[in-house]
Amino acid sequence: MQQIQHRLDEVLARLPQGVKLIAVSKFHPAAQLQQAYDAGQRRFGESRADELAAKAAALPADIEWHFIGHLQTNKVRRVAGCASMIESVDSERLLRLISAEALRAGRTIDVLLQVHVAAEESKTGFLPDELLRCAADCAALPAVKIRGIMGMATNTDDSGRIMADFKAIAATGSKLRELIPDATEVSMGMSGDWPLAVACGATMVRIGSAIFGERTPGI
Ligand SMILES: *Cc1c(COP(=O)(O)O)cnc(C)c1O
């Protein structure tokens, strides 16, 4: 118990005021999230729809759930029922579907558009120009609010490359804000690179293993 609280406090002590911490709890059991909750954490990030729905049902109702994984269209309804924010919107089709499902559920969902800047092919997201085009086309959708941008840096030890990626994400975020003034959030930075992300303008960091320890996929 003390370990999660201790790690959380360590992160919070280094995180500047005003930068939001999303505690990424994917693959960790609900009891561990409860420990972070008891230590005061209210924002959690999950990357699988079924896991999010199960944890949302089991844990306190005032948790703000952020969906951060690749969202398949057949899982949108499930996620739209419990997420406060979907950070990983990577296509216009997905965005329109989220709006339709949110409308159906009588809710409005905050979303971030995910931009792809990292070197890895495997990472998902819009190219910067596509992202801006989607934002312009979809700014008036009824049940979603575009609140900013999300991205990941290349998985590398080269801090120059990581910085360049974070700056590219933040720059796309600035252009997005010219289209949608409310789109102020810049979600970037994970356990291994978040201080660099904050230095490059992150307003939200997504930190998992530095709080909950190593993940064991499949539990
Ligand atoms: C898992 C995950 C994180 C957290 O990663 P850590 O290295 O454990 O901090 C952040 N963002 C996304 C999109 C993730 O899938």
Image: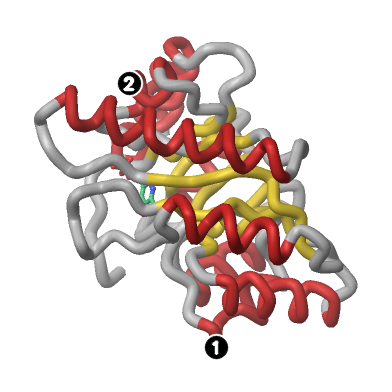
Q: Residue at x 71, y 44 (%)?
A: 179
Q: Amino acid at mark 1?
A: Asn
The part of the image, by quadrant, that contains residue 127 is: bottom left
What is the x, y in percent for residue 75? 55, 82
Label 2 crowd bin: few (<14), some (14–19), many (20+), radius 10 Å: some
Q: Quadrant of the N terminus?
A: top left
Mark 1 Cβ inside 8 Å of ligand 1? no
Q: Which mark is residue 74?
A: 1
Q: Measuring 67% from the left and 37% from the top, which residue is drawn there?
A: 177
Q: Is residue 119 left or right of residue 47?
A: left
Q: Residue at x 61, y 78 (%)?
A: 76
Q: Quadrant of residue 73?
A: bottom right
Residue 167 visible in image = yes
User: Nearer the observer, disc 2 or disc 1?
Assistant: 2
Nearest the eye: 125 or 217: 125
Q: Which residue is mark 2?
A: 196
Which is more toward the observer, 60 or 79? 79
Residue, far left: 157
Coordinates of residue 204 in the picture (x, y in percent): 54, 33
Position in image of residue 210 (x %, y %) = 31, 33
- Horizontal side, residue 189 vs residue 71: left or right: left
Residue 25 place in picture, x, y as percent: 43, 50
Question: Is residue 59 visible to the viewer in this orientation of the structure?
Answer: no
Q: CA distance from mark 2 to mark 1?
A: 35 Å
Disc 1 is placed on an element classified as helix
Please identify the residue farthest to the bottom as the structure is shown: 74
Q: Earlier in the sequence, mark 2 or mark 1?
A: 1
**Which part of the image, by quadrant, shows the C terminus?**
bottom left
